[in-house]
Amino acid sequence: MSSRDRILARVRAAVDGAPAAPAITRDYLTSHTPDAPAAVLDLLHENLADYRAVVHRTHAAGPLITELLAARGSGSVLVPDGLPREWLPGATVVRIDDTRDSTAAELDAVDSVVTGCALAIAETGTIVLDAGPGQGRRRISLVPDHHICVVRVPDQVVASVPQAMARLDPRRPLTWISGPSATSDIELDRVEGVHGPRTLEVVLLSG
């Protein structure tokens, strides 16, 4: 008998005859936000800004993204497969396609990256990417220093994490982003850009 078998036998003997575990009650609230799209969107905006993301609201993503890239002085932008063409109609920067052969050094040399998302969670100010169309691989949202993420409103906005979990596929590579990358591990001094982009700009696209 192996050590594993002996340990499991002891566990079975210890719990033999124990009462069954009580049923788990799941009548808790799945959201603490009023069921009103405008209120949910305002809360998302507030919490994104609280995490130091720069938030924009618009009905036309393309012109705004062009302005943001120009204001940043970006000479190159990483474009994941499936990104809607109308999101970059007037961009004069060099567009770089996301490929499997791209190295971390090449991604680090890119000035900006523009992606879509899977969902945005209002109560936590969190953006979730799942590598779907227009989102690319996880590393393109972690290596470039400037990330512009477009959230379709209201289709991609949920109030809470439980609501998000019901819509996400756990088999996909999920990336949860709450503001720009930051850490305070060293002497409690906040340092941004250690584990991801220093600047996160979120475009809330209505219509």
Image (cartoon, grey):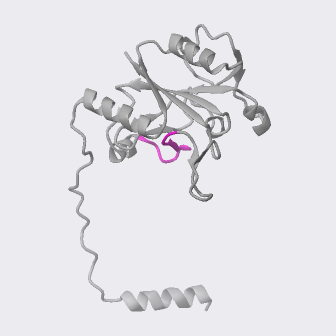
> In the rendering, at what x and y percent does residue 68 appear?
56, 18
- Look at the image and tell me in which quarter the N terminus lies: bottom right
Q: Is residue 129 above or below residue 194?
A: above
Quadrant hosting residue 142 = top right
User: How many dots with numbers?
Assistant: 0
Is residue 171 part of the magenta span, yes or no? Answer: yes
Quadrant hosting residue 19 = bottom left
Q: Relative to 18, is 86 on the left or the right?
A: right
Q: Is residue 7 above or below residue 141?
A: below
Q: Which residue corresponds to the image point at 62% horizontal and 37% vertical from the top-left? A: 197
Q: Which residue corresponds to the image point at 61% horizontal and 36% vertical from the top-left? A: 141
Is residue 199 part of the magenta span, yes or no? Answer: no
Q: Relative to 9, is 1 on the left or the right?
A: right
Q: Is residue 117 above or below residue 194?
A: above
Any part of residue 173 in sight: yes
Q: Relative to 11, is 147 on the left or the right?
A: right
Any part of residue 80 in sight: no
Which residue in the rendered view is the most extreme toward the top? 90
- Look at the image and tell me in which quarter the C terminus lies: top left
> In the rendering, at what x and y percent does residue 191 appear?
61, 47
Quick one: 81 or 180, which is closer to the camera?
180
Q: Which residue corresponds to the image point at 39% horizontal and 46% vertical from the top-left? A: 165
> In the rendering, at what x and y percent does residue 136 appear?
61, 32
Quick one: 87 or 64, which is closer to the camera?
64
Main secondary structure found in the magenta portion: loop
> In the rendering, at what x and y percent does residue 151 appear?
45, 27
Q: Which residue corresponds to the image point at 34% horizontal and 47% vertical from the top-left? A: 162
Q: Which residues are magenta?
A: 168-179
